[in-house]
Each structure stands twice: as C-alpha cells, then as structure tokens.
Amino acid sequence: MTYLALSKALRKRNPSAAERSAFVARLRDAEFKAPFVYKTHDFPQALLKWPADTRVIFCFGSTKDSAFSVYSAKERYGEEWIRQHFYHLHATGEYCDLFQRDILQQAKQIKEWAVFEDVPVLCVHYDAIWDHQSDISEFTGLKMKLPKREQRAPKEIPTELRSAASHVYDSIDEIVEELPRCFIASPKYADIVAKLPV
C-alpha cells in the first residue's frame, strides 16, 4: 500500500521515472537510478554503498499478525505465492513451521533496519502509517496519499495454531511495542532491538 502510494506520487511528478518502480526480491540486484521507488522484503546490507540521498521507508508491525496473514494467504493466493513470499523474506523454514519459530525472520528485519544508518531509514509502524503520511511525504519528497483506512478482516486461525503463534510471536511483539511508532533508524534503538530473539 505504501509502495503503491509512493509510486503514484512519483508518477504525478515524473511519469517516465515511475515506470522504473518495481518489486525487488534482492537489493543487490537493484540499480540506483533516481528518482525511483522500489519495494522489497530484503535486509539492508546491500545498501551500504548506495548514495546518501537514498531514502528508505521500513514498515514494521505485529509479527504475529503478519504470520496470521501469511497463513491465511495460502488459501487466497496458493502454494506458488507462498513459495515466492518465503524466498522474498529469506525464510528459514517451511509453511508448516510458521507457528513453530520466526521462520520469516521478522525479528531480524526489525533488528537490522531499526539501527541501519548508511542511508536514511524512516521506520513506521503499520498501524501508524495513516497518522504519519506527512512525515513520509516530507522524508521522501513525494506527496503521497494513502487510501482510506479499512479494518483488517479477522483471520480464521485454528485455536491450537493461535496458541502456538502466541508462544512464538508474543515475546517478539512485546519488544516491538517498545519502539516508537515512527522514527529515524539510529543506534539509539540498539538496546531495544538487541532483546529480539535473533
């Protein structure tokens, strides 16, 4: 959603540049050619040599809710979508492991992006994106407008899997809740993210 809103904002300013907007599975395969908008689930290390005028929006949120979304996505999108999504997230297990451990490496994502300083990173909690549209616009230089917020549809997750998910993800989410809803990545958050089980 954020990617689409930023791509639309870029299209208004520079239609030909907006054509370069894309999903990039691995940042090492991406080319810096400003202006552009990329979406990825990759880790930040590939950006170590990118120009300082790079801007990153890192969206984070409840790891348990994300796991529930992935679980329910299998029925909506099928096995191939799951396979690709697991590749994009550098998953360390199979779909059947989703509620056994953090196989999607969400804690590691948060731990690495929250303190990454080689390029500016604005970290925004998913539930706060609508409240921080102006911050995102100012940070990126693109006046984005999000669609009206809709309530998330409740996911139908069997009771035993909900219990297993709580065992894996609740402790991670407690730490995530210690982070501000919107902040510039910085070593000042290292003490918080160091507690993440990575």
Image (cartoon, rainbow, N blue to C red):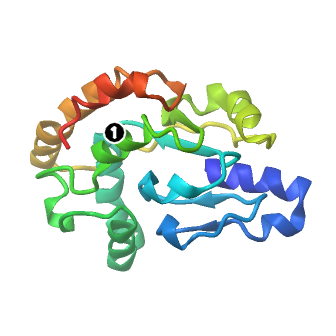
Of residues 9 and 154, the one nearer the viewer is: 9
Q: Residue at left 35%, top 36%?
A: 62
Q: Residue furthest front?
A: 49
The amino acid type of the residue labelled 1 equals Lys
Residue shown at 63% from the left, 47% from the top: 2
Task: Identify whether 102 is placed above or below 195.
Answer: below
Where is residue 183 shown, x and y percent of the image?
53, 26
Residue 42 sits above or below residue 141 on the image: below
**Which residue is at 63% across, 31% downward?**
130
- Total labels drawn: 1
Image quadrant containing the C terminus: top left
Q: Position of residue 35 (x, y in %)?
A: 78, 58
Residue located farthest toward the bottom when viewing the structure as drawn: 80
In the rendered view, tell whether residue 72 sits above or below residue 20.
above
In percent of the image, x 48 and y 60: which residue is there?
Answer: 46
Foreground pick, 86 / 49: 49
Q: In the image, is 84 to the left or to the right of 31?
A: left
Q: Residues within 10 Å of mark 1 (few under 14, many from 20)?
A: many
Q: Position of residue 39 (x, y in %)?
A: 57, 59
In what element is the residue under mark 1? helix
* Closer-to-camera residue (171/37): 37
Circle 1 residue: 111
128 vs 143, left or right, is left
Counting from the top left corner in percent of width and height, residue 26 is at: 47, 68
